[in-house]
Image (cartoon, rainbow, N blue to C red):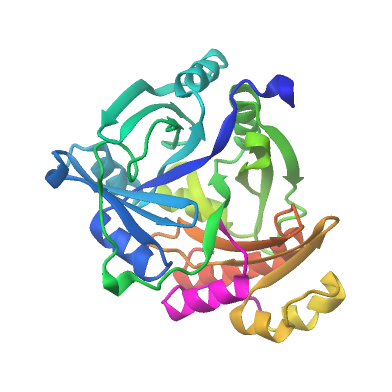
Amino acid sequence: MAENDFLPIKNWDHIEFYVGNAKQAAYYYCTTLGFRPVAYAGLETGLRDRASYVVAQGDIRFVFTSGLAPEHRACQSVLAHGDGVTDVALQVGDAAAAYQAALERGARSAMEPTVSEDRHGRVKRAAIHTYGETVHSFIEREDYAGPFLPGYAAVECPPALEGKDAGLRGIDHVVGNVELGKMDEWVHFYERVMGFQQIIHFSDEAISTEYSALMSKVMEGGQGKIKFPINEPAQGKKKSQIEEYLDYYGMPGVQHIALHTNDILTTVSKLQAQGVEFISAIPSYYAELEGRVGTIDEPIADLAKLGVLVDRDEDGYLLQIFSKNVQDRPTVFFEVIERKGARGFGEGNFKALFEAIEREQALRGNL
């Protein structure tokens, strides 16, 4: 591992979305998913071309950006793809060194190392391209004490948003969808360019139903902190969720973001009460659950009421649930996950999950 650590990553920094209306998107994430507003950049802070709202919960930071003129790349992106993730930013100790190491191994530059400063200190950032129009920014922020980045002003959380925190504490993994035949190309990209390791491979036999299938490989870096599953469609009788994503997003991109909680029953109960819609398994899933995963701490009746799935591996078990799409296009959604030792991704739930997703696809007329 040490010999491959030519691009050391400290942690997730933030995820940026290009959206049609950043102010409304930020408000939705605060009122339903329990985030709080922390920073803003726009006309009032001297920006003339865009508005960006930063929200946070636990160690998670999301940025929602809208262009203020049609030629801005955020407007172009929303026109082509709808709301979606543009930047999965990673925190590093040396942004210039990370950028140079990536370029030397074949990465394509998205932003040369740039230093920005304000009264709170300085931040250095650079960026490289990955699948589709997604980029990875490298953020070096040890010398910065501001609310987010230079140029952003801190904002107060209004009283109406107090108490919305749902217990989401960090990013577990970020899943990308790529075209048929391209998964291994991006696996090799993360190995070669960023020093990641492949930790899991799911074949189309493992992730399939009667109608659809996909293949997935999980890449891991940052000493285990950063995980990027990469999916591609596989042949099936009908259209898979990956094909549906590619059709509506128009290119490869981030499909879902898994958010970690230490108490999934409390978190999901609060999210549902605040308006988050989740995909549910059929009742027979819970009738068979104890026989499949053994003894667990959580009452099965409570899991069934909320629709939470459970899977076990050699290290323990995990609990997970998946939201419905959070915008009109069937593209981005979220996973809520609690790990009780398990290091996997819920392989035992794939069939139940895919059948539930296929029911949603059928309602949309896209199966």
Give coordinates of residue 258: x percent, y percent. Answer: 56, 56
Residue 299 versus residue 10 in the image, above or below: below
Residue 28 visible here: yes
What residue sits 52% from the left and 72% below the top? Answer: 278
Q: Is residue 271 magenta?
A: yes
Quadrant where the C terminus is found in the figure: bottom right
What residue sits 74% from the left and 53% below the top? Answer: 344
Q: Which residues are magenta?
A: 259-282
* Viewer-side residue, 363 vs 334: 334
Q: Along the horizontal axis of the image, is 35 left or right of 221?
A: left
Q: Is residue 264 magenta?
A: yes
Q: In which quarter of the view is residue 109 placed? A: top left
Q: In which quarter of the view is residue 151 placed? A: top left
Residue 328 visible here: no
* Viewer-side residue, 263 vs 111: 263
What residue sits 49% from the left and 52% below the top? Answer: 59
Q: Along the horizontal axis of the image, is 135 left or right of 26?
A: right
Give coordinates of residue 34: x percent, y percent. Answer: 42, 67
Give coordinates of residue 22: x percent, y percent. Answer: 26, 54
Give coordinates of residue 284: x percent, y percent. Answer: 74, 82
* Viewer-side residue, 37 vs 20: 37
Q: Along the horizontal axis of the image, is 325 left or right of 181?
A: left
Q: Along the horizontal axis of the image, is 144 left or right of 310?
A: left
Residue 198 versus residue 337 in the image, above or below: above
What residue sits 64% from the left and 69% below the top? Answer: 355
Residue 255 versus residue 296 in the image, above or below: above
